[in-house]
Image: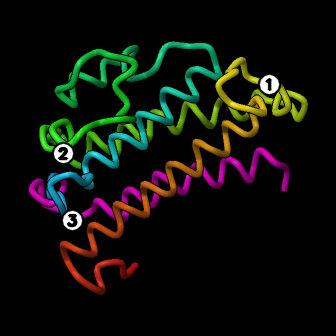
Amino acid sequence: MEWQGLIEDGYSRIYEFMKHTLTGLKHDDLNWQPQDDSNSIGWLAWHLTRQQDAQISSLIGVEQLWIKDKWYTRFNRPADPGDIGFGHNTEQLKDFTSPDIQILLDYQKAVSGRSMKYFTTLSKSDLDKELNEPWFQPLPTVGVRIISVLEDSLLHAGQMSYIRGLIQGMGWQKY
């Protein structure tokens, strides 16, 4: 298997895991927070997709799908490309209202599709290109960024699964 196949497999798991975790939840379940200052399943699904959209769009050098395709309207959120959830405070977490499951999944599918197309354009040498982000030392590369986005997405997908377990108890994850 070539490296593109590994990356594509990893990224395709985000959507599949989200779909499995979200299927069958009620709207109240999407917005339930285990504690007042914690994330909800809907917020996590939104955030992991937003950060993928923002970071991969930046690597490609194109407008985020959030803005280009007006996903913000379906989420009832501002048309702010910086609104990706990093640094949200307790009030912002409480105020977040998830759209329905299909919108969460459709946005992830669109963002994943763009990411997959991008991966097919990369050569091995493209992965070593350093990003102009001097606040990180050493400077990250395109390859490092692709993996960090994947890691963040999978971590948040795991959090979604954990919260669903808190809501429904053991046994919900049967395939």
User: What segment is highlighted magenta in the picture?
Assistant: 1-30
Q: Label 1: few (<14), some or many (≥20) within 10 Å?
A: some
Q: Nearer the viewer, residue 36 or 14?
A: 36
Q: Nearer the viewer, residue 119 or 90?
A: 90
Residues at discs 1 and 3 in contact (Cβ within 8 Å): no
Residues at discs 1 and 2 in contact (Cβ within 8 Å): no
Three-letter amino acid code at the position of disc 3:
Gly
Q: Label 3: few (<14), some or many (≥20) within 10 Å?
A: few
Q: CA distance from mark 1 to mark 2?
A: 38 Å
Prevailing secondary structure of the magenta residues:
helix
> At which x and y percent is residue 164?
26, 69
Residue at the image point whose x is 85% and y is 31% from the top? 128
Q: Label 2: few (<14), some or many (≥20) within 10 Å?
A: some
Name the residue that disc number 1 marks. Answer: 130
- The image's mark for residue 100 is 2
The verdict on residue 10 being magenta is yes
Three-letter amino acid code at the position of disc 2:
Asp
Farthest bottom residue in view: 170
The verdict on residue 108 being magenta is no
Which is more foreground, mark 1 or mark 2?
Answer: 1
Name the residue that disc number 3 marks. Answer: 24
Earlier sequence position, callout 1 versus callout 3: 3
> At which x and y percent is residue 172?
29, 79
Earlier sequence position, callout 1 versus callout 2: 2
Q: Nearer the viewer, residue 115 or 153?
A: 153
Quadrant of the image occupied by residue 80: top left
Residue at the image point whose x is 70% and y is 34% from the top? 119
